[in-house]
Amino acid sequence: MTARFAIEGLNKSFAAPVLKQVSLQIRPGSIHGLVGENGAGKSTLINIICGLLAADSAELTLDGKPYYPMSRAAALAEGLALASQELSLIETLTVEENILLSSLPESAFRIDRRKVRLQAQELMNLVGLKHIPPQTPLARLRLAEKQLVELAKALSMPTDRIKLLILDEPTSALTSAQADQIHRIIKQRADSGLSVIYVSHRLDDVLSVCDTVSVLRDGVIQHTAPGSSLTSDDLIREMSGEELSQHNDDEVRKIGDVRLRVERLSNADFPEPISLQCHRREIVGIAGLAGAGRSELLHAIYGLGAGHQGKVVLVEPAGDVLIDSASTAAKNGIALIAEDRKSQGIFSGKSVSLNSTVAGLSKLSGNLGAIISKREQRACKELISRLNIKSEGPRQTIDRLSGGNQQKVLIARWLQADSDVWLLDEPTRGVDVGSKLAIHNRLRELRDQGATMLIVSSELEELTALCDRILVLSNKKAVASYERGQWSKEKLLAAAFSEHKGERALAG
Amino acid sequence: MLSKLSLLFEEIFIVIALLLLILFFGLMTENFFTTGTLRAILTQLPALTVVTIGMTLVLISGGIDLSVGSVVALSAGVIGVAFTVFGLPLPVAGLLGILAGGCAGLVNGVLGSYFRLPVFIVTLGMLEAARGMAYLVTDSQTVYIGASIQALSLPISGIGVSASFLISLGLVVLAQYVLTRTVYGRYLIAIGTNEQAAKISGIRTEPYLMWVLVVSGLLAGLGGLMNAAYLAASDPNAATGLELSAIAAAVIGGTSLMGGRGSIVGAFIGVLIISVLQNGLAQMGVSEPVKRLITGLVIILAVLIDRWRSRYA
């Protein structure tokens, strides 16, 4: 029997290649698992299959016919259903309207309310939402329930029209009982001929549901094998690749005194309290999968948002300082460079000068807050040359700079503010290799000058290269902490996946 | 030096537009270049100018203040009643009017900033509420104040312009200085450009977002004083729709409704353009509906030119 869906030689690059010569064959009635660490290229692959992105080169066939969807709607029309991790639901509509949104009969002028309602109720019963009235506004549902609605929506297409079902992290918010229910449904559908691509971080789920599993690493399919022949340790090994050569500092550096104390900090984003101490001349890494609560932790330490329990203390010679707001944090020498440069970092349309001096203006102003232009210009020029920022000068708008140079401007902003505690969220995301090395070296220099750093990164190589210690978060919990020399990529990944598997006890 | 040149360059487009407009009316009407026209423009100008200063600051912070027209009427009403009914001295009455404006601004500011309500809605509510209060204060009657208050809006002998005009000009210069050369102005621009990034940069955004509305209220209160001086009376119907003229002037002067970008000097030139346009059209004998039509088209044209300029300049 030929494949239901086949990919041959798929390539996709953004700034750098993301997917390289990917080939996949999915048989009718097969549940095909797809796993890989963050940034391996899973989302890009799914987006291409669903028509949200175009491949640079590829041969895609669905039921033996060429398949090149130009849009999400085109993919849907070809019989491709998706339940996505980023839910495609509309908060203001009711549950039943959401479920039937993409499958309402287009030709009919009038919607047969009764029939529609019946169909929605049926699907809701199927996925275990019997207890919720179909007319409930979606916004009232909890995340797990929304995930079930998303699934019901994907299943709403008539069985004869749906050819390939893609499930992207369908169970990430579900309890194991709910997940089992979903898995039963998927297996039933597969038995009656539906092909499924199943993407998940829960490796045990993948192994129990999928008949075939492919591992994606750095945009390449490393391995495809029957699910029954694999263990989750096999998958972790394949995802992480060979052991990376350890970066050993030749000289033994002396880590300084405690500078930052996080004491039983928790909030709505990560309900289990996290405690942590960071020292002068130390870089602490935070590893974890997307959604593990890494950015939320940095933001909470910085005093952003509300409803925190516990406390964050900055240890000063003159006495401890309690950090309770972003402005106290900034004033006392804490710097935050957020993950999303565009929406939380730069001031778009403004000059390099404004962008680099905004956090340290007090040093550049005289009486009554008057900014001394000469001082500002000089400070900005110094920062540009110190960080080797490639720009036409202080007056150039920041948008014209490359991503790497924009990131350097953000570092400059906090240098100007004399920060010595740095919270860095994906400091080199979307940055070219040259700038990346430059930023790494700059961070090491700052560390040697006595700075304290907390770095969140999805790239384990970045963490193992920079950090003295790595804290691993999994599913909003701190699960492990490794000193330099103790860690391996395998251990880190295993810890990062541990809570997503939903069984391993707290380690470390 | 370079920064000053580029500031001029930013404003040069609208200055040229203003000069062309004056030239056009000079050629089209016989009496445009007379002291009468100048006086008409100069007496109406101060109230709109001070209100536009506040509006421009609010727009730069990423907000909007729809209540200014009503607050002008409220302030004027308070002044008229304080002076005529309670017999307070004129300076005290004037101060009360300005403070009344400040109070309205404080309510706007606290609700918009600390209670996180949309400023558009809050100030829309204040637009109604302040107008209602203006009617209540004046008992829906125009309160005649008398010649004493007119001193503010009559030309000072030897200078040829009124005290109101000098005050508004001084405030233009002061506000432009604060906006471009002080930490406060810089923070306001930062907040209006990207509030989240401003917060992360350690700026406490709430006080700034509150104070900018308080300042707008105080300036509208001052506008009420100037309005009363020019009419020699408190008219509860005064300044209806003034908020739209102020927004138009700010936008003509290059202020972005999305926040983060704007200039007080530019907005002042915007005020001049609107005043010249309205007086010139009136002298040409254009009817009121056509006047409004043309003014509307000019505003849209200004935004188009501004869009083009920011893309290619």
Image: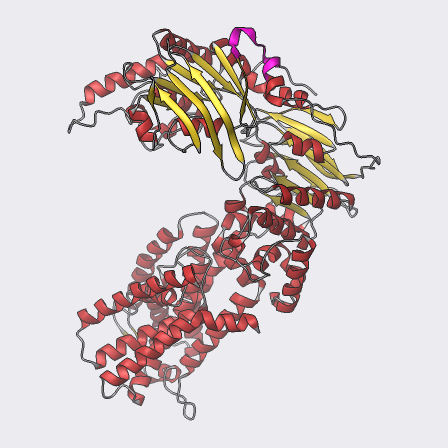
Residue drawn at 68 percent across, 59 percent down: A382
Question: B246 or A353, which lies in front?
Answer: A353
- Tell me which corner region of the image, top left, top right, bottom left or bottom right, holds residue B303: bottom left
Quadrant into which the C terminus of chain A falls? top right
Which of B223/B273 is in front?
A: B273
Residue B248 in sight from this viewpoint? yes
Point 68% across, 41% down: residue: A440
In this view, B22 is above or below B258: below
Q: Is residue A83 visible?
A: no
Q: Front-most of B17 and A52?
A: A52
| The N terminus of chain A - image quarter | top left
Name the outermost residue toward the bottom: B158
Instruction: Tally the marks.
Output: 0
Q: In the drawing, does residue B299 fall left or right of residue A337?
A: left
Q: Main secondary structure of the magenta part?
A: helix
Image height of B36 relative to B242, above or below: below
Which percent across, then down, holds residue A333? 69, 48
Relative image position of residue A56 (x, y in whole percent): 44, 34
Magenta highlight range: A225-235
Q: Position of residue A459 (x, y in %)?
A: 62, 32
Closest to the observer, A172 or A162? A162
Answer with the quarter of the image where residue A300 lies.
top right
Instruction: From this view, report whether residue B141 is shown above or below residue A67.
Output: below
**Is B187 left or right of A89, judged from the image as shown?**
right
Quarter of the view holding residue A252: top right
Was residue A295 drawn as part of the magenta stretch in this picture?
A: no
The image position of residue B101, as x and y in percent, is: 41, 65
